[in-house]
Image: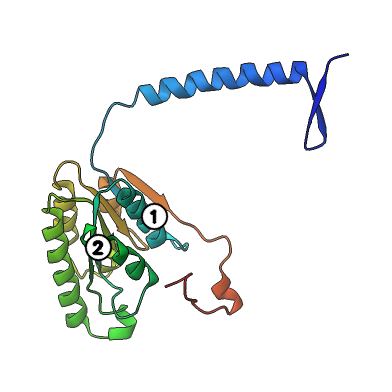
């Protein structure tokens, strides 16, 4: 009788183990070949969009990863800026390796001032262009740029053209709902974050460490 081992109370005999080993060996060969076929290395234009929570959080996760390799990161916030965020405090620990500009005036329903919103977006975009030209920065997060584009605070064609012309090796992450089709088309990676369930619908307010 074959020796048996138990995983989660299910008996696995030597034949099962050998079949699994052979299956995984084939899978590894396919995976290794696929990885080896990828030879391009370039700066990416990444778009995090959709109605779900986590677009900015994901962008800051990439920023943290980049910082872990000793790189420099830039952040320009197009809408946010009037309220305090734990992320900004956390990234401050990295000193001058993080350049952070919170230039938003708040959401349009808060300011209720179109000229002011446009002026703030234009100033933030000018700062973004400045950081895109800074060769020390490896990753640039343009937080809520999609919102500024959605409300036509900025010229979409000019923004997309500038992002396409970004210097070689620079990674740019754009966040915000309702990404414009032209930006999606220009991007290398687009993640649409959906909503399966959200605590706001149950009356839970924005909380420290979760939303800000």
Q: Position of residue 57 (x, y in %)?
A: 41, 60
Q: Quadrant of residue 55?
A: bottom left
Residue in view at x 30 percent, y 80 percent = 82
Between 189 and 152, the residue placed more toward the observer is 189
Mark 1 Cα-neighbour bin, 10 Å: few <14, some 14–19, many ≥20: few
Mark 2 Cα-neighbour bin, 10 Å: few <14, some 14–19, many ≥20: few
Q: Position of residue 138 (x, y in %)?
A: 22, 49
Where is the N terminus found, in terms of image quarters?
Answer: top right
As measured in the structure, the alpha-carbon distance from the residue carrying label 1 to the one carrying label 2 is: 17 Å
Where is the C terminus found, in terms of image quarters?
Answer: bottom left
Between 201 and 29, the residue placed more toward the observer is 29
Task: State whether residue 210 is above or below residue 94.
Answer: below
Residue in view at x 49 percent, y 77 percent = 206
Residue in view at x 82 percent, y 22 percent = 4
Mark 1 or mark 2, which has the lower sequence index?
A: 1
Residue in view at x 18 percent, y 75 percent = 120
Query: Dot 2: what SS?
Result: helix
Q: How is the image coloured?
A: rainbow
Q: Position of residue 137 (x, y in %)?
A: 19, 52
Give left or right: position of 117 versus 82.
Answer: left
Q: Which mark is residue 61?
A: 1
Give left or right: position of 134 versus 196.
Answer: left
- Determine which residue is flagged by label 2: 95
Between 200 and 31, the residue placed more toward the observer is 31
Task: State whether residue 32 is above or below residue 42.
Answer: above
């Amino acid at each position: 009788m074959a020796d048996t081992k138990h995983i989660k109370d299910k008996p696995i005999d030597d034949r099962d183990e050998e079949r699994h080993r052979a299956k995984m060996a084939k899978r590894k060969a396919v995976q290794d070949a696929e990885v080896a076929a990828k030879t391009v290395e370039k700066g990416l234009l990444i778009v995090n969009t959709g109605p779900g929570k986590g677009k900015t959080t994901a962008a800051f996760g990439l920023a943290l990863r980049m910082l872990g390799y000793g790189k420099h990161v830039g952040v320009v916030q197009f809408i946010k800026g009037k309220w305090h965020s734990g992320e900004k405090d956390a990234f401050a620990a990295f000193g001058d390796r993080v350049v952070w500009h919170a230039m938003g005036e708040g959401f349009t329903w808060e300011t209720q001032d179109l000229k002011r919103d446009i002026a703030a977006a234009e100033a933030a975009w000018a700062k973004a262009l400045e950081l895109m030209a800074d060769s020390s920065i490896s990753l640039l997060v343009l937080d809520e740029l999609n919102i500024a584009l959605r409300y036509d605070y900025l010229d979409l064609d000019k923004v997309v053209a500038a992002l396409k012309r970004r210097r070689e090796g620079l990674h740019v992450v754009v966040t915000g709902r309702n990404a414009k089709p032209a930006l999606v088309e220009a991007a290398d990676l687009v993640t649409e974050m959906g909503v399966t369930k959200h605590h706001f619908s149950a009356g839970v307010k924005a909380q420290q460490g979760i939303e800000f």
